[in-house]
Image (tube, rainbow, N blue to C red):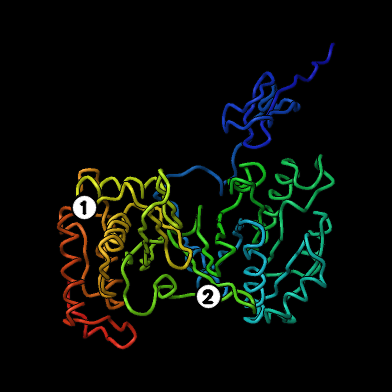
Amino acid sequence: MATRKPSTAYRCAECGWTSVKWVGRCGECQQWGTVTEVAEQTGILRGFTPHAPTADRVARPITDVATIEAPRRPTGVGEFDRVLGGGLVAGATILISGEPGVGKSTLLLEVAARAARSGRRVLYVSAEESTAQVRLRAERTGALHDELFIASETDLATLVGQIDQVVPTLLIVDSVQTVSSSLSEGLAGHPSQVREVAATLVRIAKERDLPVLIVGHVTKDGSIAGPRLLEHLVDVVCHFEGDRQTALRFVRALKNRFGPTDEVGCFEMTGDGIAEVPDPSGLFLGHGTPVSGSCVTVALEGRRALPVEIQALVNPSSTPNPRRVVNGVDSSRVAMILAVLERRAGLKLSALDVYVSTVGGVRLTEPAADLAIALAIASALGEFAIPHQVAAVGELSLSGEIRAVAQLAQRRSEASRLGFVHFVDAGSKHLPAALDTVRGHADRAARGGRGPLDRQSRGPSDVPEF
């Protein structure tokens, strides 16, 4: 009897999409050059005999399933616990991605040190640094503890042996792209290697109820390197982001099976490591006497309402094509706001250079900052200073109408807590009315009716209701 020759198939190394013939571009993730020839996975074969499920695995109505809330263990880093939803869940695998040098290893070493100080045994496996290098960084950040074990391993089998020997209650692997398995083809970082290493770590986490933190590299466009299957295997995906020119860092949860995905953790890189920023409100506000071209808005980062100062500068242009330079805001959004200001508010800006920037290096992407950008530009053009106690939130339409934004009550509450007295929003209806309102506040402040607000000296009882 002739044996059946195994047929071949073609599979995408990024997302796992299969095809009967070779194509240059994956039909699922649209990546080029990722489809390679593999042995066909036939699935159900002839003669396959189904097995009856055991008593504890019989399908039953979902209403009969008991709800068991997963217990959490705080990491000791409050901002990281906020992103995770309260702490680490036993058996959870957490993938942390970010650009090189943003501070992923520093954050995880701090998490490991605080967990060790609480009496938990931690194994930190660094496949990119030697143990001596990790020790030097731990000395600088004050992360030395007897319950913190470190190892430098790039082989998956040896890594599993280290887990068996140390028996940790928390495992950190830095990073998944530098660990390889002899049971899989390719070098470390190859999609098949990443898939094998991640699957093994996930299986160990589930079998031993061991929380595992995994560091993942990112590509040039900022997405997580390796196959997309990596993101589906883990329970939580966190992205660590920040500008190298500033000390502020944000951690966002892109996926979380045990908590919300709209929380943001704030950190600050210091000479001694990484520090939490429970209240980052003062980082994005200017100080001193109010000057023209400055307006404060209240932006949302996850569930957090953060006041951000927007600065604008208007200058006569020396070139036929005036310059439009922005930093921290969307350039196309600013171009639209300039057109609305000129058409609906009568401000002549077409022959002027316009510069718009945010304070503190924060980036604003939501349209709720439109009104503050418009008021800052109008303030720079009219050379009147908007008082510190004025905040503006609203989306501008092309007709000059000010539209309401999401979670306005939370923005108002945060502005009131920080001492902002006047809140300009959709209640002004149209942009000219908002400009008149702000000019009125500026004129009263200039006449000495109300000076600049000292946010440090005013208490909540001194702030009137909006």
Tag 2: amino acid: Glu
Residue 201 badge: none
Residue 332: percent from left, percent from top:
39, 45
Is 38 placed left or right of 298 in the picture? Answer: right
- Closest to the camera, between mark 2 and mark 1, is 1
Does label 2 or label 1 sit earlier along the sequence? 2
**Viewer-proximal residue among 183 and 14:** 14
Q: Is residue 303 above or below residue 235?
A: below
Q: Which residue is mark 1?
A: 402
Name the element at disc 1: strand
Residue 434: percent from left, percent from top:
18, 59
Is 227 placed left or right of 328 in the picture? Answer: right
Q: Residues within 10 Å of mark 2 (few under 14, many from 20)?
A: some
Residue 168: percent from left, percent from top:
71, 69
Q: Residue at 24% across / 64% down in the picture?
A: 409
Q: Quadrant of residue 399?
A: top left
Looking at the image, which residue sits at the far front? 318
Q: Residue at 71% across / 60% down in the picture?
A: 174
Q: Which residue is mark 2?
A: 276
Q: Quadrant of residue 113?
A: bottom right
